[in-house]
Image: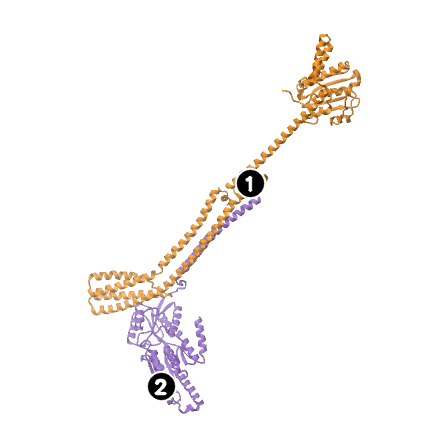
Amino acid sequence: MSSSKKNLNNKIGRRLLLTILLSFILVVAIFIAMTLLRFNMTRKENLSEVGSYDKYYVMITDNYKSDFWQSVYKGALEEAKKNNTYIDLLGEKLSGNYSSEDLMKIAIASKVDGIVISSTESSHMAKLIDEASKNDIPVVTLYIDHADTSRISFAGVGSFNIGREYGRQVLNIIKEKRKEDFMEASKMKNRKTMQIAVLVNSDSKDTGQNLIISGLQETIMGDKTSDSEFSVSLVTVENTNAFSAEESIRDIFLKKEIPDILICLNELNTICAYQAVVDHNKVGEVNILGYHDSDMILKAIDRGVIYATISIDTRQLGEYCVTALSDYYEIGNTNQYYSADVTLINKDNVKNYMKKGEDNQND
Amino acid sequence: MTKFYNLPLQIKIISIYIFANLLILIVNIFLIMGINRMTLDMGMVYQDNRHLNELSNSLMDVQQCMTNYLNVKTSDSLEEYYKKAQKFEELYEDLNDEVTDISFHRMERNIKNMSRTYMDEVTQTIEAKRGRNVEKYRTHYENATQIYDYIFSYIRSLNIEQFASNSRHYNRLSKSFGVFETVSVSAMCLLMVINIFIITNFVRMIIKPLRMLADSANEVADGNFDVKLPEVVIHDDIGIVISAFDKMLFSIRQYIDKLKESMEKERYMQEKELMMETHLKDAQLKYLQAQINPHFLFNTLNAGAQLAMMEEADRTYEYVQTVADFFRYNVRKQESLVTLGEEIELVDNYIKILNVRFSGDIHYEKKVDDSLLQTQMPSMILQPIVENAVNHGIREMGDKGKITLFVYEDESDVCVSVKDNGKGMSPEDAEMILNGKWKCKENQYDNNGIGMDNVISRLQLFAEKKDVIDIISSKGNGCEIIVRLPFISQK
C-alpha cells in the first residue's frame, strides 16, 4: 500500500471515528442533561439533611410569635438536637388559634415524649398537667410555675432579683432627675413626687410578676431617699383578650397624671409603651424600664426612649427546659428549679448587644 | 473500518441514512422518556394532599357513624361503624410516625397518635353505649369529639402546608419542564447539525473520486492519454468504474502504438518497392538505350539463323541462335525476379558470343551445385559482372584469359563467384566500387550500360542487407566477385 493510500485510509478512518464519537457524545450529553434535570426535580426538599430523632417534645406558650419565645425555643431546639430529640413549638404550624389548654390536650392526645409549658396559672391547666403526668408524659413549666402540680421541673428567672434590678434603675433615674434639678434652681422649689407605674397583667395569679414587684418595692424602700419623692402604683394591663394590652397602655397616656417611670414586665408591654411615648411626644419625660432585648427595644434604648431593659438569657432558658426533660428520662429525676441568667442593658452597653444581635442574625 | 468504505454505493448510502435516522430515533426515545417521567412526576405532586383528603373523609365517616350509632343504636349502624373504623385505622397506620426535621413528618406523627387516642375514645364510647352507661359514654363522646376537632384541624393545617410545599414543587417541575423543552430543542438542533455534518462528509467522500474521474475523462477527451487517474482507495462501484476506465485507457494506448507501428512498416515496404522498381526501370532504360529495339534485332537474328541452317553453315547457325537467345532473355526477362539457372544460362550465351567474336580466346569454366539453380534473384546481375570481368580483366590477355563461375552454399547464403585471372584492381578501387563511387567512362564501347553500382543497389534491396557483394582482388592477380544471395527457392 502506498503512503498516500495509507494517508487517505487514515483520513477516512479518522473521519468515521470523529463522526461516531460526535454522535456518542451527543447521546451521552442528552442522557446526562436528563438525569440532572430529573435529579433536580425529584429533590423535593433537601432530604439529604433530614435527621431522625428518638424523642419528641413540644413547647406550649401563649404567644409563640413573640421574639422572646422564639428565642427560648431556639435555645431549646439546639439543646434538644444535641440529645437526638426534636422539640416543636406547638401551634405554630396549626391553622386555628388554640388556647394553651387546647394545645395541652393536643399534646397529650399526640402522645409526645415531653411537654414544656408556659401558661398562666389556672386550675384547668393544673388538671391537664396532672393528666399528662398520668399518661407518662413529663411536664416542665417554663417561666411561670405551676408549683402545686405534678410537673417535674420549672425553668424560669429569678423574679425577685429582676425586681431589685428594676428598683436600682428607678433609683438611678431619680438621682439623675435630682442632679438636673440642682442645676436648674427654679425647679428645686416645685419639685414633685416621682410617679412610678408598674404595668402588671390582669392575671393576679402570676407569681413571678408579684415577686418582681416586691423586689422592686424592697429596693426602693431600702434606699435612704425620702418617701415623699416617689410613689409606686400598679397599672393593670388587660391581657386576657387579644389586643387589649395595647389599649390599656394607651389609656395611661390619656389620663391627666402621666407617670414618670413606666416599668414593663413583658416584651409586648415594653414595645407598646415605647410606641405610646413616641406617639404622645413624651420622650424624655417618661422613662421606660423594659423587658427582654429584642432588636426594637435595643434600638429604642440606643435612641434614649427606653431607659434600660432587663435581658434574660432566653437560649439558656430553653436549654434548661430540655435538660430537665432529658435528665428525667436518663436519671429518672431532675432539678426542681432552673434559673436563667439576667442582665441589664442600658445606654452604656447597648451597642455591644446590638452588635451581638447582628452577629447572631448573620449566623 | 475500510470494510465499510468498500461496500457497494447503494448499501453505503442506505447505511448512512439508517445511521442518521437511528441517531434521531435514540435521541427522541430519550426525550420521550424524559417527558413521560416528568408527566408522571407532575401527576404525583398532589398525591399527598389526596391521601390526606381521603384520611379526613374517613375520619368524618367514623365520627358520623359513631354519632349515628349513639343516636339510633341499630346493628346496621354498628356494622357500618366497624367498617369505617377499620378503613380509618388502615389509613392512619400508613402515616409516618418518625420524628424528623421535616415538619410534615412530625405533624403526621401527631395525627397518627391522635387518631389512635381518638379511636380509643370512640371504642370506649361505643362500649359504654352498648353497656348503657350514659354518664361514661357522654364523657367519652365529648373527648372523642374534641380530639376529632383537633385531628381535623391538624389535617387541615398539614394539608395547607403540604399544598404550599407541593405548589413550590410543582413550580419547580414546571420550570424544569421549560428547561427540558429548551434542552430538547437544542438537542434536536445539535443532532441536525451533526447529521448534516455526517451526510455532507460521506457524500463528499463518495463524490470526490467521481469528480476526479470526470476531470481525467475530460483531459483524455482533449487528447492527453497519459493522464493520471485518481487512485482507487475505496473499492465500491466508483472504484470499479475508475479501474475500468484505467483499463480502457491502457488498451487504447496499446492499440494506438500498434497502429503506429504497422503504419510505419507499411510505409517502409512501399518505399522499398518503389526503389526497386525505380532501379529496375533505370536498368531497363539503359539497356534499351543500348539495344535499340531488341525485338527487331532478335527477329532479324532469328531470320539469319534460319538462313545459315538452310545454307548448312552449322556454326553460323549456332552462333546466331545464341545471340538470339541472349537478346531474347533481355526482352523476356523484364520482370524483376528470375532463377539463378536462367542467369547462368545468360552468362553461358554471353561467353559463347564473345568466343565467336574473339575466336575462342576466353576460357570459361563453371562449377555449379545444381540444387541451387532454382534460387531466386533479381535479373541482369551476373551478366554485367561477367562483362566487367571480360572488359576490365582479361581483354588484353589474348587466349590466356580465363573466367570461372562457382555456385555453392555458404552458411545460409547461396554464393555465386565470378573469378578471372586478369589484371585485377587495387583494394581502393574495389572499395570505391562497393560504395558506388566508381565513375565509369562515358561512351565506353561494347557494354550494355548496366554499371556495378546498379547491380549492387538492386542486390541490396533484394537481400535487405548491405553485405551482398565481396570483391577479392589485387593488382595483377585477377579478381573474384562473390554475390551472396539469400536462399529463396522459387517454390
Rendered image: mark on residue B217: 1
Q: CA distance from mark 1 to mark 2?
A: 122 Å
Residue name at image x 26 percent, y 65 percent: B120
Nearest the viewer among A175 and B125 is: A175
Asked where in the image residue B89 lies, by quadrant, the reply is bottom left
- Dot 1 falls on a residue whose secondary structure is helix
Compared to B59, does B402 lie above or below? above
Nearest the viewer among A4 and B141 is: A4
Circle 2 Cα neighbour tier, 10 Å, few/some/many (<14 / 14–19 / ≥20): few
Check the image and name the residue furthest to the bottom: A189
Q: Colour of chain A?
A: purple
Chain of the residue under the numbered disc 1 shown in the image? B
Residue name at image x 71 percent, y 8 percent: B310
Q: Relative to residue B467, is residue A171 drawn left or right?
A: left
Q: Where is the N terminus of chain A found, in terms of image quarters?
A: top right
Is label 1 in contact with label 2 (beta carbons under 8 Å)? no
* Residue B72 screen position, x and y as percent: 19, 64
* Residue A16 screen position, x and y as percent: 50, 48
Q: Which residue is mark 2?
A: A257
Of marks 1 and 2, the one in the foreground? 1
**Amino acid type, callout 2:** Glu
* Residue B430 screen position, x and y as percent: 76, 25
